[in-house]
Image (cartoon, grey):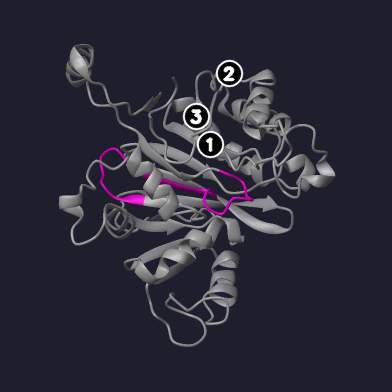
Amino acid sequence: MLTKRILWCGVVGAWLLYGLLALPALAGFQVVALGSGGGLSGDNLPAYLIRHERDTGYVALDAGSTLPGIAKALAQGAFPEASAERAAPWTPQGYVLRELITAYFISHPHLDHVAGLLLVAPEDSRKPIYTLASSAETLRTHYFNWKSWPNFSDAGQGQRLGTYRIHSVRPAQRFSLGNSGMSAQVYPLSHAGVTSAMILLERAGEYFAYFGDTGADSVEQSNHLDRIWRRLGPLLASGALKGMIIETSFSDAVPPSHLFGHLTPRLLNQELVQLARYSGDSAALQGFPVVIAHIKPSLRAGETAEQTIMAQLAAGNRSGVRFHHLRQGEHALFSGRE
C-alpha cells in the first residue's frame, strides 16, 4: 500500500487522525523524491531518499539533485523532525543533508545522477558511498581528482579530504548500508554500454527495489533484468517486496535505436509481465506500487512528457500494477499491494 502524507485540519481531520492512531502502525519504506526528472533542468535530477519505518536515517538513492529537492520536501512536510530548533546550528536543509542522510547509493556515474553529491560535498558530513566497482573507479578518477572537482573521497589523486568513503560492492553481495539499519544487494543493469545498477534494500524481512537507468533486455541484448526478475519474483509472491522505483524515460514514440539504454512504457510493461511470471502467479502484481522515475521533459510546445508516459503505461498495463509518479518534494509510505 502507498500512503501519501497529508496534513488534516479541523474537526473532520481530528476524527480521521484519531481513527488512524487507533490502527496498527504501517510497516514499510518511507520514500522522499528529491528529484524525479530525467534531465535538462539541473534542479530536478534523479535522487530519492529512503528509510524503513523502524529507523530514522535515510539512504540517498542517487544524488542528481540534493539541496533543491530537500527544500521542496521540507515545504511539503517530509521531514517534521528537521525543525529550526532541532536543526540548530544548521538550517533545516543542512540538518537533513548532514544528519538524516546517512549514506549514498550511486547507480552509475552519469552526471545527472551525481551532480548533487558533488555540489554538496563541501558542506556534507562524513558518510559512505556504495556503488559497483566500475562506478567507484569513475568517481575517483574522473570527478574526485582536483581537476573536475576537489577530492572529497578517501582514495584517488592528490589530497584526500575524506568526506566520502567509497565502497565497491560485488554484484549480489549483501552488505549493511551505513547506520541506516538497512542491508542491501546490488545487481548490474545495462545502460547503453555503461554498467548501471539496481539496489534491493532489506529491513526486517521487507524489501524495496530501486533501479538506476536501464534499457530492456530485448534492446540491450542483455539478461540483467531477467536475472533481477528471478530474484524479485519470490519476494513479490510472498508479499515481502513492498515497492519499486524504475525509470521510463521516453514515450512509445521513440524508436529503440534512439533510447540509449532507457525504457518506454511498452518495454516496461513487457518486463513486468516477466516479473509476474517468475512470481508463479499471474495476479501477483495486482495493486503493487511501481514509481516511475527519470521521465525526460520535452521542450515542445503543448507536450507534457509525464502525462503522455503515464497514460501509455496505464493503457498497456497487463499486470495490474499501480503506477505512480512522485514529483519533486513529494513523499510516500510503501507497504506493499494497494
Q: Is 95 on the left-hand or right-hand side of 43?
A: left
Which dot marks residue 236?
3
Q: Is 52 on the left-hand or right-hand side of 322?
A: left
- Indicate whether residue 251 is drawn in magenta: no
Which is more toward the observer, 27 or 151? 151
Say if mark 1 contacts mark 3, CB within 8 Å: yes
The amino acid on which the numbered mark 3 sits, given as a three-letter code, is Leu
Q: Distance between the residues labelled 2 and 1?
A: 17 Å
Question: Toward which corner of the image does residue 281 lie, by quadrant?
Answer: top right
Question: Toward which corner of the image does residue 73 lie, by quadrant?
Answer: top left
- Range of the magenta residues? 37-58
- The residue depicted at 43 percent of the width and 45 percent of the height is 201
Circle 1 SS class: helix
**Looking at the rendering, in which quadrant would you find the C terminus?**
top left
Circle 3 SS class: helix
Which is more toward the observer, 55 or 99? 99
Which dot marks residue 232?
1
Which dot marks residue 320?
2
Question: Toward which corner of the image does residue 285 lie, by quadrant?
Answer: top right
